[in-house]
Image: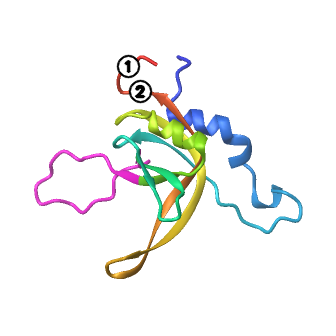
């Protein structure tokens, strides 16, 4: 058996001590619950940096993560080849470190990240809207789609 690991196995090993804990094993006196996300997947497109009306700078990207298990689809009249089922996750980077890491990524790079699920509210043409995204606290490139020379 070789020593190579998938991105998911690597993330699981690197944060397994934290992810494997039960709620009762968290810090004494802390309220029950935990908001922790661990993802490993492929970058859909290069990250984008933008400035918010508040003056804060953020970097956003999308990570495509394959779903485990058989795809859940309605039976088509004509059975054809089944496509893989994936989730496309919006990720936002607020800290200078995660912003820099995200801006170095290219489309199709494999990444692993840790963070928390956030619900963000904003004003839109139809009134107040919201969306869920993962706020990255750690982000790292596992392997690239092509050589970047760095």
In the image, residue 77 sits, relative to residue 128, either above or below, namely: above
| Label 2, residues with CA under 10 Å away: few <14, some 14-19, many ≥20 | some
In the image, residue 107 sits, relative to residue 88, either above or below, namely: above
Q: Is residue 149 magenta?
A: no
Q: Is residue 46 left or right of residue 140?
A: left
In the image, residue 1 sits, relative to residue 104, either above or below, namely: above
Q: Which residue is mark 2?
A: 144
Q: Is residue 97 left or right of residue 6?
A: right
| Label 1, residues with CA under 10 Å away: few <14, some 14-19, many ≥20 | few
Q: How is the image coloured?
A: rainbow
* Residue toward you, 71 or 102: 102
Q: Which residue is mark 1?
A: 147
**Residue 107 spot, x, y in % from top left:** 34, 36
**Residue 18 spot, x, y in % from top left:** 72, 46
Report if residue 20 is visible in the image: yes
Question: Residue visible at 41% across and 16% down?
Answer: 149
Report the predominant secondary structure element of the magenta stretch: loop
Q: Is residue 112 left or right of residue 18?
A: left
Q: Are marks 1 and 2 in contact (CB under 8 Å)?
A: yes
Stretch of the chain drawn in magenta: 65-88
Mark 1–mark 2 Cα distance, whole angstroms, equals 7 Å
Q: Helix or strand or loop: what does disc 2 sit on?
A: loop
Question: Residue visible at 50% across and 32% down?
Answer: 141
Question: Residue visible at 53% across and 17% down?
Answer: 2
Q: Helix or strand or loop: what does disc 1 sit on?
A: loop
**Residue 147 spot, x, y in % from top left:** 38, 19
**Residue 47 spot, x, y in % from top left:** 40, 43
Q: Is residue 74 magenta?
A: yes
* Residue furthest left in the image: 78
* Residue toward you, 127 or 142: 127
């Amino acid at each position: 058996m070789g020593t190579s690991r998938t991105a998911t196995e690597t993330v699981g090993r690197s944060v397994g001590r934290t992810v494997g804990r039960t709620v009762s094993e968290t810090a004494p006196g802390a309220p029950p619950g935990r908001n922790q996300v661990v993802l490993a997947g492929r970058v859909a497109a290069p990250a984008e940096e933008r400035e918010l009306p508040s003056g804060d700078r953020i970097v956003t990207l999308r990570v495509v993560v394959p779903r485990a298990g058989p795809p859940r689809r309605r039976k088509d009249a004509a059975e054809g080849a089944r496509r893989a089922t994936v989730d496309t996750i919006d990720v936002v980077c607020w800290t200078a470190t995660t912003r820099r890491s995200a801006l170095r990524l290219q489309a199709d790079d494999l990444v692993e990240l840790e963070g928390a699920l956030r619900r963000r509210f904003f004003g839109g043409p139809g009134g107040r809207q919201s969306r869920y995204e993962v706020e990255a606290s750690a982000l790292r490139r596992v392997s690239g789609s092509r050589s970047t020379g760095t």
